[in-house]
Amino acid sequence: MKSLLIAVAGFAMMAAAGAHAADRFDIAITVDDLPDHGSQTPGLPRIDIAHNYINALKAHQVPQAWGFVNAVGIQREPGSEAVLKAWRDAGFPLGNHTYSHPNVNSGTVEAFEAEIEADESTLKTYMGDNNYRYLRFPFLSAGDAAHHDAVNAWLKAHNYRIADVSVSFDDWAYTETYNRCLAKNDQASIAILKTRYLAGVDAGIVRMKSLSQAVYGRMIPQVLLTHIGGFASIMLPEVLNRLDAAGAHYVTLEQAESDAAYAETDPKAGDGAMMERTAYETGKDISKVPAGPNNAGIDAMCK
């Protein structure tokens, strides 16, 4: 593990040294599953997780971070609506992630549309007259042939935009394992989790840049997917440090998705990670693009 820690630290130092003006890229930060991603993190209340996120974003001068809401969380954990209030008090917008986070393919088109509508009363409460009509598909699943076209037509008729994703460091994969390790006070395993995750962040940044060049021939604006869990909130400051070192310039989701790469003419808009999806749809060879995060074995830890 010591050699891996040294390698990760060395990569971060090289990234910082190499982040010249030519390396700069635009990136929007988005956060899924407000108010409560995953199980309760021992010793870290939901509102503290939210403040960890907000403080890190503000410290790095991130101008905006859309928080995508599953309003069922308020019913599941009374009091967790304080997360939504804190998010809005910070000046960040809230968008629609459906009421209870179903996969669009799990029921009828009408049932999925009802899930979107059921989320709206909470969004209206906190967003008021401001726009909340961005949808992030749960599980980044935009539907099979029997669902996607009909749902897309409904979204357009109701003035929704799709919040696509171009990059993720898979923080969700660490949420429950971290909670288990913390409950057992297994500090050695927690150290491994942090090291593994940051190695994945470094790999993900390299892949993001290489993939954009391979698919588009340029560095397109990026949209990062994160989740409002305990582990992610603790790791976010270092994630932002590494993005800074790599040349990140933080922008709004609207700014990022005004780029032609995000045009919603794609019949599978919102499905999976956009750059990989576009490579598949356009037949671009990405076989030489470096691999991203590797989470193999994480779920088995601290059981």
Image (tube, rainbow, N blue to C red):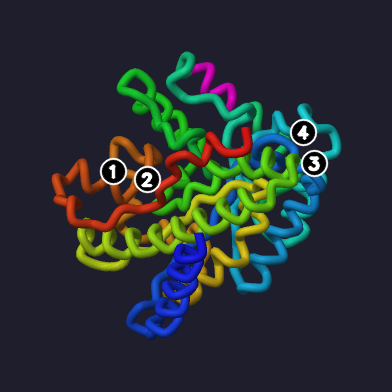
**Mark 2 vs mark 3, CA separation in Å:** 29 Å
Which of the marked residues, 4 or 3, is nearer the chain's N terminus? 4
- Quick check: marks 4 and 3 in contact, CB under 8 Å? yes
Amino acid on which disc 3 is placed? Glu
Q: Which residue is mark 4?
A: 74
State the image quarter where residue 295 is shown: top left
The amino acid on which the numbered mark 1 sits, given as a three-letter code, is Arg
Mark 2: few, some, or many residues within 10 Å (few <14, many ≥20)? some
Labelled pair 4, 1 in contact (Cβ < 8 Å): no
Which residue is outermost to the front?
Answer: 2
Report the residue marked by disc 2. Answer: 273
- Kindly identify the amino acid type of the residue bearing the numbered disc 4: Ile
Residues at circles 2 and 1 in contact by the CB criterion of under 8 Å:
yes
- Residue 167 visible at all: yes
Mark 3: give few (<14), some (14-19) or many (20+) Cα within 10 Å.
many
Position of residue 79 in the picture relative to residue 239 (left or right): right
The circle drawn on residue 81 is 3
Residue nearest the viewer, comparing 100 with 236: 236
Say above or below: 290 vs 295. Answer: below
